[in-house]
Image (tube, grey):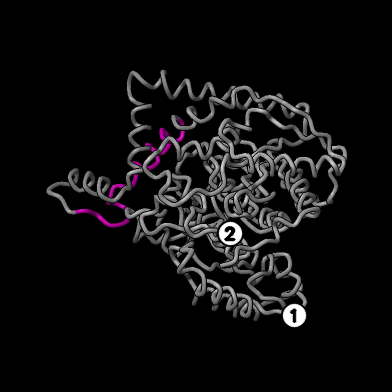
Amino acid sequence: MTDLHTLTVAAARVALAAGTLSSYELTEALLARIQAVEPRVRAFITLTGEQALAEARAADATRRPDSGPLHGIPLAIKDVICTNGVRTTCGSAILETFVPPYDATVVSRLKAAGAISLGKLNCDEFAMGSSTETSAFHITRNPWDLERVPGGSSGGSAAAVAALMAPASLGTDTGGSIRQPAALCGVSGLKPTYGRVSRFGLVAYGSSLDQIGPFARTVEDLALLMQVIAGHDPRDGTSAPVPVADYCAALSGEVRGLRIGVPGEYFVEGMEPGVEQATREAIAVLRAQGAEVVELSLPHTRYALPAYYIIAPAEASANLARFDGVRYGPREPGESMWDEIELTRGRRFGPEVRRRIMLGTYALSAGYYDAYYKRAQQVRTLIKRDFDAAFAHVDVIAAPTSPTVAFKVGEKLDNPIAMYLSDVCTLPINLAGVPSLVVPCGFSQGLPVGLQLIGRPFDEATLLRVGDAYQRLTDWHTRYPAL
């Protein structure tokens, strides 16, 4: 058999079901791969190798014809998602010792489907960043070029899949944190509709924006994972009671008759020519297969970035108030309780988190709420209406994911505005709450480029159908970095 660490989730399922591969062999091969490349990539915060091997032995011993759809398949989890008995740090010193006493719903569903966890993956602190450089523990490197970032905030989740250390992983997306690293690392990633996947057990950054979603090397694998993690959860008040489609059955390979809209506003000034070329060539592939491609306008796109950087920090300001050293993580000593809280938050939150808390607190303060937060929410409504109007005429919207390929480590760290602009093509989707899929579509300057496909609310099935059809016609998703 081929090198086991290169197997996709779908291929591993077939081999495991046929008895030509054991879960223990697969897990052992992935752990050997991690040992070989992790010191250079640094995608993990916590590796649970012994636990994974024990779970693999149990999976092999309990395999039956009706075993779960991910039975015995190892995956990895972004470290903002709670895992019972395994520390969840959110990439922050303020939670470096926190061990949750429960699993997030997505983790419970993965376990019920038979999946095995390899460990917790690095991310920007509290998912605030676009490069995985704000983690309190270490910087994750892009497997295609170790001098460059993997994107963020789910950089560890994307890098682990790109470096063949895990066939799939979970990440989160508040403003592009699944799609941008998927594009920069040359893997596939899906941000579901807001409310499609339970947020119970996700440590919140922006509660009206956050969504959990999968990374994998193929759209087929994304469909397999979505089938497991999607669906209503009564423990999450924002979870939508909307039926879940059969995502795998939707992968027909056919796009003929679909209308694909291309918004001019997403081809922003300063976009790398190679990124635009790869994106337009990918759209041409879909047109050649019978999809109708039409130009359209999303006129309020230009306001998404400033609106997002009012709304998200405001929500972060409220959500992160609970982290004060009293209930979670280590506490800095002080002369009084208030001194301890001030010292703990001041010393253990990183500079980017402090910056966003201050931005959000200011936007919510008396005299500024109407001028900033309320107005940003009004802009958000206009952006949502743009998408509603577009989807009255098209089935899918195709656009670039990032205006550039992966940039060098440290290149934008001291320039927050330049860093925030990295997500200019992804932020509107979170404000509108619609789903979006990224698939590899080429290279620019020797680095991966991703095509972004945007869909109607709760219509992940059509996105997956189009992404899978594109991957049947191209081989970008089969290319691996030469680590």
Q: Look at the image and say whether residue 329 sits in the magenta stretch.
A: yes
Q: Of tags 1 and 2, which is closer to the observer?
A: 2
Q: Residue at x 55, y 67 (%)?
A: 117
Residue 454 is inside the magenta segment: no
The residue depicted at 39 percent of the width and 45 percent of the height is: 413
Kindly identify which residue carries mark 2.
169
- When asked about the image quadrant of residue 387, the answer is top right
Secondary structure at badge 2 equals strand
Which badge, 1 or 2, is on the more N-terminal residue?
Answer: 1
- Residue that lies at the very extreme toward the left in this rendered image: 335
Q: Quadrant of the C terminus?
A: bottom right
State the image coordinates of residue 395 (x, y, percent, origin top left): 77, 35
Q: Is residue 416 above or below residue 55?
A: above
* Label 2 packing within 10 angstroms: few (<14), some (14-19), many (20+): many
* Magenta segment: 311-332
Q: Nearer the viewer, residue 357 or 62?
A: 357
Q: Which residue is mark 1?
A: 19
Q: Position of residue 373 (x, y in %)?
A: 44, 25
In this view, the residue in front, 370 or 83, is: 370
**Visible in this render: residue 338?**
yes
Name the residue: 48% across, 45% down.
Answer: 130
Near-viewer residue (336 or 40): 40
What amino acid type is highlighted by mark number 1?
Gly
Give how far across and how far down residue 438 sits, in percent. 65, 47
Residue 233 visible in image: no
Question: In the drawing, does residue 292 fall left or right of residue 262?
Answer: right
Q: Is residue 348 above or below residue 390?
A: below
Q: Mark 2: which amino acid?
A: Ser
Q: How many circles with numbers are drawn on the protein? A: 2
| Quadrant the N terminus occupies | bottom right
